[in-house]
Amino acid sequence: MTTMHADLVIVGGGLAGLVSTLEALRSGLKVILVDRDTPERLGGLGLWAFGGMALVGTPLQKRHRIPDTPERALADWLSFAELAEDDVYSRQWAEHYVHRSCPDVYEWLRREGVGFMPAVNWVERGMQGDGNSLPRYHVIWGTARHLLKRMIAQVHAASSGRLQILHQHQVLSLEHQAGQICGVQARRETDQAIVRIQAPIVILAMGGINGSEASVRAHWPNDRPMPSTFLNGAHPYSDGTLHHWVADHLSAQIHNAGSMWNYAAGIPHPQPHFPGHGLSAIPCKSALWLNHRGERIGPQPLVTGFDTHQLCLDVARLEMPYTWQLMNWRIAIKEFAISGAEHNPHIRDRHFFRFLLDTLNGNKRLIRQMLAESPHVLADQTLEGLAQRMNDLTGKSHIHADVLNATVNAFDAQFAQGNRLYNDDQIRRILHARQWPADRLRTCKPAPLQKPGSGPWIAMQLQLITRKSLGGLRTDLQSRVLDRDNRAITGLYCVGEAAGFGGGGCSGRRSLEGTFLPGCILTAKAAIRSIVPSSECH
């Protein structure tokens, strides 16, 4: 058995682990970072993430005359989260987030060489206005991939010989004596050798609980319908194994394990990285969302951008574990998008003018790519032909052309009297969304689906896709792991998704969206401030 020594062991090389590593190195600590993946995947799932951040009171908001304040953001957060009154630590982390996201995330990232796109987007507005009452969604220029690459570069620049990174090592257990953490044991996956790392402090940054289908099903809440199949948009290594080890051996609390941030519009990845790997599509607001028979889902039409949690509930309750979005070419090129760096190359590679041209003229490249690569994205010049393609994909005869025609005709009838007599909640929500300039750029003006020149028809088969854990190990505002009596376990910290982004579940039932990457940064900074009180981490 190989034995190594350090001041601090960090378990997991995602954003939370890298920020912890960076701030620890800058504070003079000797650090060993243990990551299970290969060297080129250092950075974790964030390498493929889009990079949206919910931030409060930023200069970018002020530039757009958005009158945001921490008090207003906290009210929005609590209305969406529905936190229990006695959930003290989650509430503390929510309050910490809204007060510190600007100085500790926005301003800090700007100093680290990470910038943001000029628009502030408005997401998760709530079905009844109970979500984000103002635009807060800031998009990293370069996507989260640029952020992670920048953090990795900064970590190496700060190392000064005080950093070792153990790639392809899985932490199996923590060592402890008399209630004090004293290191970890890890297995090197290339030859199964055991490595012992002695250190008085361990930071857990291993990601969420629900990265595997078995873990998702084990933690699925009893009061929510669970579809028979779903896609995996999380990392398969984040399966909760280390969470449960810490709970079983150190009496740590796993809080809110059943709360997950899933999406209703997943598509199987055409080149999957692992079994069940899915892409998270951003559903088109102007498309009709249909059940497996081609009927419009209702009575409340499904429209993205208001309440993702409710969309997932509505989709999970359906008879079949998939839905269809029906649209035309006009809608698809303006509104269809896929979350993540992989399918947003102009943002990822910071080609502003190419991105602007796609925004203004339509992203024809993406829709053509998906039509070519994905059997779940279908096109035809007629609804009759489209219905046949939809049935060919499922191997069933659920879709009848006359039903599709009737669904489209019923929607188009809203426009029979021009633009004055709409009475459809989907159209009302689209008009509301288009009042904000950033949404108007990528949301079609309401029009009949059968408007001449709008073809061909396009149908996308979608299913629920898992993404993030909203629960995790219970932590205090110093990111210290708490035992079942709410006492800090000496020497043990937890950050990022492993801690439910703070407190074991500060987002509660629903997130305002974009709270995850900032939560990784805020929890990591809190941990290092606690470990090194004289640290300049702020």
Image (cartoon, grey):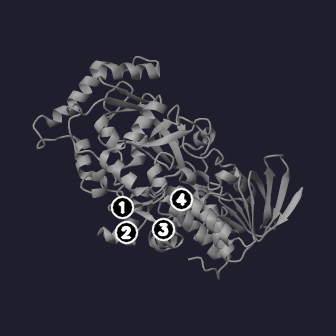
Disc nearer the start of the sequence (1/4) = 1
Q: Residue at x 44, y 57 (%)?
A: 81
Lateral position of residue 387 relative to residue 234, left or right: left
Q: Residues within 10 Å of mark 3 (few under 14, many from 20)?
A: many
State the mark number for residue 146. Answer: 4
Q: Is residue 273 above or below residue 255?
A: above
Q: What percent of the width, then of the height, locates residue 148?
A: 58, 59
Q: What percent of the width, then of the height, locates residue 110?
A: 49, 71
Measured Cα–Cα span from mark 2 to mark 1: 7 Å
SS state under label 3: helix
| For the residues bearing labels 2 and 1, Cβ distance under 8 angstroms | yes
Q: Quadrant of the C terminus?
A: bottom right
Q: Quadrant of the N terminus?
A: bottom right
Disc nearer the start of the sequence (4/3) = 3
Q: Nearer the viewer, mark 4 or mark 3?
A: 4
Disc nearer the start of the sequence (2/1) = 2
| For the residues bearing labels 3 and 1, Cβ distance under 8 angstroms | no
SS state under label 4: helix
To which residue does mark 1 refer? 120
Name the amino acid type tagged 3. Answer: Tyr
Measured Cα–Cα span from mark 1 to mark 4: 19 Å
Q: Residue at x 36, y 45 (%)?
A: 304
Let me know if residue 305 appears in the view. no
SS state under label 2: helix
To which residue does mark 2 refer? 60
State the mark number for residue 97. Answer: 3
Name the amino acid type tagged 1. Answer: Val
Name the amino acid type tagged 2. Answer: Leu
